[in-house]
Image (spheres, rainbow, N blue to C red):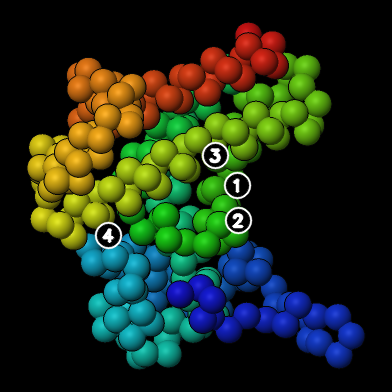
């Protein structure tokens, strides 16, 4: 969807200069309001629609109908879908705030990871937003600031610190996107549980395991006791990443 958006020419010889960012424009004094439409009401309505029906249902026309305003009214606040998506991301990113009483690099990064998983599962459309739009918002930058500040002061140079920060976030992003994708596929197939998944995939798995080409894989699958506990799996994988960073970088 984002590829279809019209974007400003990046400037340069013969090109027009980029427009001010959404966040810079929102910092400017607001004009005298003609109605109750605000960036916040736009974001809240868009999030509500996306949570219920998916990102494809979020259109300017649909928002206008939901908010009972003229179809072009939203363009007083956003220049297009990219701006709207950024507002939506920033709206739900308030859920990522780690309480001040949580201290220590490991505790802050772990809490942020758990909150990110919870927020993404509650708003699965987040996995469809292009990375620049999902990362460059005030609340997302504030979340990154909290994590980087927790890692700061432990003797890491800037490059190593950023690797540690990005490694944890790469694990979180990959694990949560896989979980969201599985949930979406289950919904498409009408499956409601792990037993439904195994029953639906049984013919393929039975044939593959029956070839005796994958004995260790098959034995491991049969020995699983927590195959339907994604929260435990996520937290355990996260602790492995954090343990690895501590051992490799000498973090306390």
Q: Which residue is mark 2?
A: 136
Q: Secondary structure at mark 2?
A: loop
Q: Is residue 232 visible?
A: no
Inter-mark Cα distance, 1 to 2:
6 Å
Q: Which residue is mark 4?
A: 51
Q: Residue at x 26, y 83 (%)?
A: 65
Q: Which residue is mark 1?
A: 141
User: What is the x, y in percent for residue 221?
Assistant: 25, 26
Q: Residue at x 54, y 20 (%)?
A: 242
Inter-mark Cα distance, 3 to 1:
16 Å
Does label 1 or label 2 sit earlier along the sequence?
2
Question: Pointer 2: residues within 10 angstroms few (<14), some, or many (20+)?
Answer: some
User: What is the x, y in percent for residue 5?
Assistant: 53, 80
Inter-mark Cα distance, 2 to 4:
21 Å
User: What is the x, y in percent for residue 152?
Assistant: 71, 24
Q: Residue at x 29, y 81 (%)?
A: 62
Q: Nearer the viewer, residue 85 or 177?
A: 177
In front: label 4 or label 1: 4
Q: Nearer the viewer, residue 117 or 224?
A: 224
In front: label 3 or label 2: 3
Question: Pointer 3: residues within 10 angstroms few (<14), some, or many (20+)?
Answer: few
Residue 170: mark in rendering: 3
Q: Taking 228 as reference, is 86 left or right?
A: right
Q: Taking 28 as reference, is 77 left or right?
A: left
Q: Residue at x 67, y 15 (%)?
A: 248
């Amino acid at each position: 969807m984002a590829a279809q958006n019209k974007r400003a020419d990046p400037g340069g010889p013969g090109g027009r200069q980029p427009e001010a960012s959404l966040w810079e424009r929102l910092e400017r004094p607001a004009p005298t309001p003609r109605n109750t439409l605000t960036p916040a009401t736009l974001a809240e309505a868009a999030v509500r629609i996306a949570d219920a029906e998916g990102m494809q249902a979020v259109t300017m026309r649909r928002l206008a109908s939901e908010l009972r305003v003229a179809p072009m009214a939203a363009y007083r606040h956003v220049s297009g879908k990219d701006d709207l998506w950024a507002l939506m991301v920033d709206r739900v990113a308030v859920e990522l705030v780690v309480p001040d009483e949580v201290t220590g690099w490991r505790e802050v990064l772990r809490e942020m990871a758990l909150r990110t998983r919870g927020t993404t599962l509650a708003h699965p459309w987040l996995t469809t937003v292009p990375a620049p739009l999902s990362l460059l918002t005030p609340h997302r930058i504030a979340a990154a600031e909290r994590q980087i500040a927790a890692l700061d002061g432990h003797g890491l140079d800037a490059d190593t610190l950023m690797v540690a920060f990005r490694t944890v976030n790469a694990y979180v992003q990959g694990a949560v996107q896989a979980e969201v994708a599985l949930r979406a596929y289950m919904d498409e197939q009408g499956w409601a549980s792990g037993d439904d998944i195994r029953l639906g995939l049984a013919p393929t798995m039975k044939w593959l395991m029956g070839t005796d080409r994958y004995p260790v894989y098959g034995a491991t699958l049969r020995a699983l006791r927590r195959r339907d506990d994604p929260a435990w799996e996520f937290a355990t994988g996260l602790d492995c990443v954090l343990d690895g960073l501590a051992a490799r970088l000498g973090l306390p």
